[in-house]
Amino acid sequence: MTVKPTPPVDAWSKPYWTAAQEHRLILQFCPDCQHHVFYPRLYCPHCDGERLAWVEASGRGVVYTFTVVRNNAPSAFSADLPFVIAVVRLAEGVQMMTNIVGCDPAEVYMEMPVEVVFEKLNEAITLPKFRPVNKDSKG
């Protein structure tokens, strides 16, 4: 059985991954230009500011774009087929690549409201993923 690859954890992304283990979604925020930033970086991509701080994200967004993976070469992801890879636009304005879970892939659509959920891969990595928001969701 092939092991799924895991994202690298470096000094500037460690707070993000630690928060994910705690089932919290955090983003960087630049106090100089007032922009949220994702993915974790050393400098603000909007103004080159060096004072990026971590802030709690709402965990809400919409599907910006997506694809349904129905088949692929044998890999560690074969057992997950079919699955949805999406770009979610968070309420804070940033976009992140993720998976849509908790629904049939055929039910996913553009601008679908979603909320964050977390999947523990191992002791070091918990992945933020997103599921459709429904009337039973809090918020």
Image: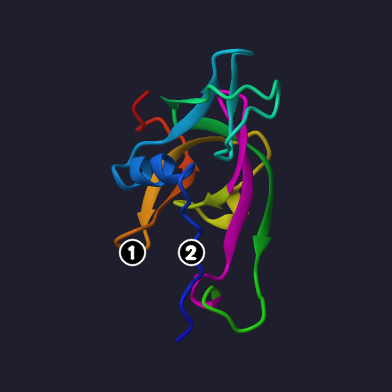
Residue type beneath disc 2: Thr
Magenta stretch: give its range. 78-97
Tell me which residue sits at (65%, 65%) in the image.
69
Mark 2 falls on what kind of element? loop
Q: In the rendered view, does 39 fall on the left or right side of 22?
A: right
Do residues under tags 2 and 1 come within 8 Å of each other at their CB atoms? yes
Say which quarter of the image contains residue 119.
Answer: bottom left
Question: In the figure, 88 relative to 67: above or below?
Answer: above
Left or right: 129 as drawn, with respect to 18: right
User: Residue at position x 59%, y 13% from top?
Assistant: 34
> Quadrant of the image for the C terminus?
top left
Q: Residue at x 38, y 48 (%)?
A: 118
The residue at which mark 2 appears reads as 6
Horizontal side, residue 19 vs residue 131: left or right: left
The alpha-carbon separation of the residues under discs 2 and 1 comes to: 9 Å
Q: Say few, some or many: other residues with alpha carbon within 10 Å of mark 2 (under 14 / 14 to 19 / 20 or more).
A: few
